[in-house]
Image (cartoon, grey):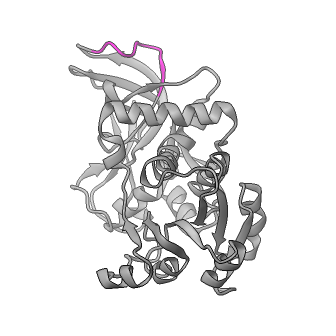
Amino acid sequence: MANAIRLTRTGDARVLELTQGTETAPGPGEIWLEQEAIGVNYLDAMQRNGAVPIPLPNGIGLEAAGRVAAIGPDVSNVAVGDRVAYALGPLGSYASHRIYPAARLVKLPEDISADDAAAVVFKGITAQYLIKSTYPVGPGTVVLLYGVAGAVGQLLAPWAKHLGARVIGVVSKQASVERALAAGCEAALVWGECDLPAEVSRLTDGRKADVVYDGLGKLTFSTSLDCLRPRGMLVSMGASTGAPPPVEMGTLNAKGSLFVTRPGLAAHATDIAEYRTRVLDVFDAVRQGIITPKVWNRFSLADASRAHEAMESGASQGSILLKP
């Protein structure tokens, strides 16, 4: 019996419905996957509540790990029994079993568990492209990172530090300062408790940040611009406080010829070769100990609504998984 969460309407976490189905034979280029661990991401909640529109009815979820249970015609990159993981592709990872395109599967190294893979692939790819493609971080780069205590921040901060960056974290409460410092930040500033641009300037001897990674959006956008050095880059990587306001081109000029970008995972992981390169880089970083998968909590698939409520409460201190 195959169980899956379906979405027929948008709304709060209660709209996530557990449904039952049957095993489906994979078609050309497809596999039937027995899933062992499913990653829960903030994008899932945005699709669920309608902030990011998707066709309805639909499955939900973009990341999981498990074993190949059956293969369809024209599949040569994996075999029955292989341990694999994936991110993106067709919606529907909130399921015990599913059909999935074989080309997007990446085999798991023996020393990476399904739970670790589901905790790190989607978020790890995000951190990887942000520090290696959006703004290539290197020795001496000054990084200002919001949400460093969250799941993506806990990967991005140590990885950026490994590349030689100086990372200044921004957290929402004093209780998260220790977590930010443990992740590799040289300083952690509490939003609302200081003049953030002045503190960034002080910590960098007046230089300010080369790049700001801002996942909050509306609340922090203007302040983030003021934390940048001339010709620095603001990377708007989320909007948990609402969409950032429009910015006048003249403002960017007046503040020092700044750059602003809004990258997304799809543009960095749709091409199969690029996607596989990024996933393998994430796995390599895990195996070297540069980043560490951290599972904060596990919920049963039937309790997907509780998992979303926990994620949206802001209480999580790492990845949330669903277990079929």
Write the residue at 39% across / 75% down. Answer: 257
In this picture, is 226 found above or below 184?
below
Relative to residue 167, is residue 93 drawn left or right? left
Relative to residue 32, is residue 230 drawn left or right? right
Write the residue at 34% across / 60% down. Answer: 47
- Regarding residue 284, the answer to whether it shows in the image is yes
Write the residue at 40% across / 26% down. Answer: 33
Q: Position of residue 52 (x, y in %)?
A: 31, 63
Q: Number of numbered discs present?
A: 0
Q: Nearer the viewer, residue 166 or 102?
A: 166
The quadrant holding residue 91 is: top left
Q: Position of residue 215 (x, y in %)?
A: 49, 67
The quadrant holding residue 10 is: bottom left
Write the residue at 37% across / 64% down. Answer: 261
Q: Position of residue 63 (x, y in %)?
A: 44, 41
Mostly what secondary structure, the magenta segment? loop
The quarter of the image holding the N terminus is top left
In this picture, is 59 found above or below 250?
above
Q: Is residue 79 magenta?
A: yes
- Regarding residue 248, the answer to whether it shows in the image is no
Q: Position of residue 12 (x, y in %)?
A: 41, 68
Q: Is residue 243 magenta?
A: no
In this picture, is 91 found above or below 46?
above
Q: Which residues are magenta?
A: 75-84
